[in-house]
Amino acid sequence: MSDAAARPAFLTVAEVADAMRVSRMTVYRLVHAGEMPAIRVGKSFRVPASALEEYLAEATIDQDRLTS
């Protein structure tokens, strides 16, 4: 396994916002509220790609709960 494959992939706030179809401010709010983990690089935030996947998986609404 190469070093690049072992390192986690990080996304910018803009990339996360595009993937979620929300504004960058919404992503910043999630990060500051502790709902989405991120690391700070200088003045910027980077979100692990796995954190985005986990957030979306947890936020997905189960159809059975909608009909109950």
Image (cartoon, rainbow, N blue to C red):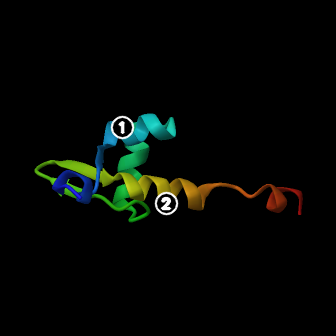
Locate residue 1 relative to residue 66 in the image: left or right. left
Which residue appears farthest toward the front when viewing the image? 1
Between 43 and 50, the residue placed more toward the observer is 50
Name the residue located 20 percent from the left edge and 51 percent from the top edge: 4
- In the image, residue 13 sits, relative to residue 30, either above or below, namely above
Look at mark 1 in the image and give the residue it sits on. Answer: 15
Which residue appears farthest toward the left when viewing the image? 42
Q: Are marks 1 and 2 in contact (CB under 8 Å)?
A: no
Which residue appears farthest toward the right when viewing the image? 68
Locate residue 21 relative to residue 9 in the image: left or right. right
Along the polypeptide, which appears first: circle 1 or circle 2? 1
Could you say whether the residue bearing mark 2 is in a helix, strand or loop? Answer: helix
Name the residue located 17 percent from the left edge and 56 percent from the top edge: 3
Q: Please provide percent x and percent y for residue 14.
A: 34, 36
| The C terminus sits in image quarter | bottom right
Residue 60, quarter of picture: bottom right
Name the residue located 36 percent from the left edge and 57 percent from the top edge: 31
The type of residue carrying mark 1 is Glu
Locate residue 51 relative to residue 42 in the image: left or right. right
Look at mark 2 in the image and give the residue it sits on. Answer: 54
Could you say whether the residue bearing mark 1 is in a helix, strand or loop? Answer: helix
Q: Please provide percent x and percent y for residue 49.
A: 37, 51
Q: Please provide percent x and percent y for residue 41.
A: 14, 52
- Number of other residues with Cα within 10 Å of mark 2, as a class: few under 14, some 14 to 19, many 20 or more: few
Residue 48, quarter of picture: bottom left
Residue 37, quarter of picture: bottom left
Q: Please provide percent x and percent y for residue 16.
A: 39, 42
- In the image, residue 2 sits, relative to residue 17, either above or below, namely below
The type of residue carrying mark 2 is Glu
Q: How far apart in space, not on screen, are marks 1 and 2 (Cα)?
A: 16 Å
- In the image, residue 23 sits, relative to residue 7, either above or below, namely above
